[in-house]
Image (cartoon, helix red, strand yellow):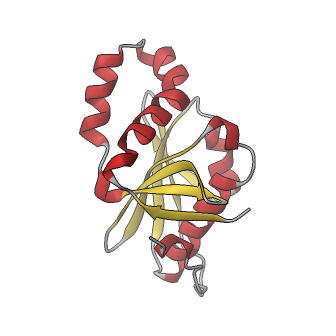
């Protein structure tokens, strides 16, 4: 499967928002109860189009990622894969590419994930370790390996 990232475009907003609600509604309901209007307001405060990329698999939109790069780390803010495409290695591929890029730059990758999200196990398998937690989330970090390696260029594609 050919997994790539492409630039976010304004026309992608509905896809991004609806995929977030589709994949996270169960967890939001469990912790906070579901209020669509409130969730739309919350989404609009943390979603940053300039940090978002669309994940494609064999040319089809399969999800999205939001990441922020600074001098010391890459923060993986969000990654969502459509339910029909989950379990096919797409998220793993995207995260591994991000880890390779971070390794090349000698940067850590950090993230926060809801404690009840099964993705915690994926992150652990990919080398992330918990740094701390709060009532709802576990905060994780993957440090660069010594020596660095050449990154794949898929994280740079537009």
* 105, 51: nearer the viewer: 51
Check the image and report above or below for 53 versus 14: below
Check the image and report above or below for 80 versus 53: above
Give me the residue at 45% from left, 40% from top: 15
Count of numbered circles on the image: 0
Q: Whole-percent x and y of residue 112?
A: 46, 45
Q: Whole-percent x and y of residue 80?
A: 54, 44
* 17, 112: nearer the viewer: 17
Give me the residue at 48% from left, 55% from top: 54
In the displayed structure image, the side of residue 88 where residue 94 appears, left or right: left
User: Where is residue 142, by image quadrant?
Assistant: bottom right
The quadrant the N terminus occupies is: bottom right
Q: Whole-percent x and y of residue 5?
A: 52, 63
Q: Whole-percent x and y of residue 44?
A: 26, 36
Give me the residue at 43% from left, 27% from top: 135
Check the image and report above or below for 67 versus 31: below
Give me the residue at 58% from left, 74% from top: 100
In the displayed structure image, the side of residue 63 where residue 2 appears, left or right: right
The quadrant the C terminus occupies is: bottom left
* 110, 153: nearer the viewer: 153
């Amino acid at each position: 499967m050919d997994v790539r990232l492409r630039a976010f475009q304004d026309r992608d907003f509905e896809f991004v928002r609806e995929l977030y609600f589709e994949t996270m509604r169960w967890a939001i309901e469990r912790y906070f109860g579901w209020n669509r209007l409130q969730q739309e307001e919350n989404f609009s405060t943390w979603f940053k189009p300039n940090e978002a990329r669309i994940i494609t698999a064999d040319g089809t939109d399969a999800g999205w990622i939001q990441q922020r790069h600074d001098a010391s780390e890459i923060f993986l803010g969000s990654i969502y894969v459509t339910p029909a495409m989950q379990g096919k290695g797409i998220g793993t591929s995207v995260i591994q590419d991000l880890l390779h890029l971070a390794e090349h730059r000698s940067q850590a990758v950090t993230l926060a994930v809801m404690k009840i999200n099964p993705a915690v196990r994926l992150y652990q398998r990919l080398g992330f370790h918990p740094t701390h937690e709060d009532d709802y989330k576990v905060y994780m970090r993957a440090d660069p390996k010594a020596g660095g390696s050449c990154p794949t260029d898929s994280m740079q594609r537009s």
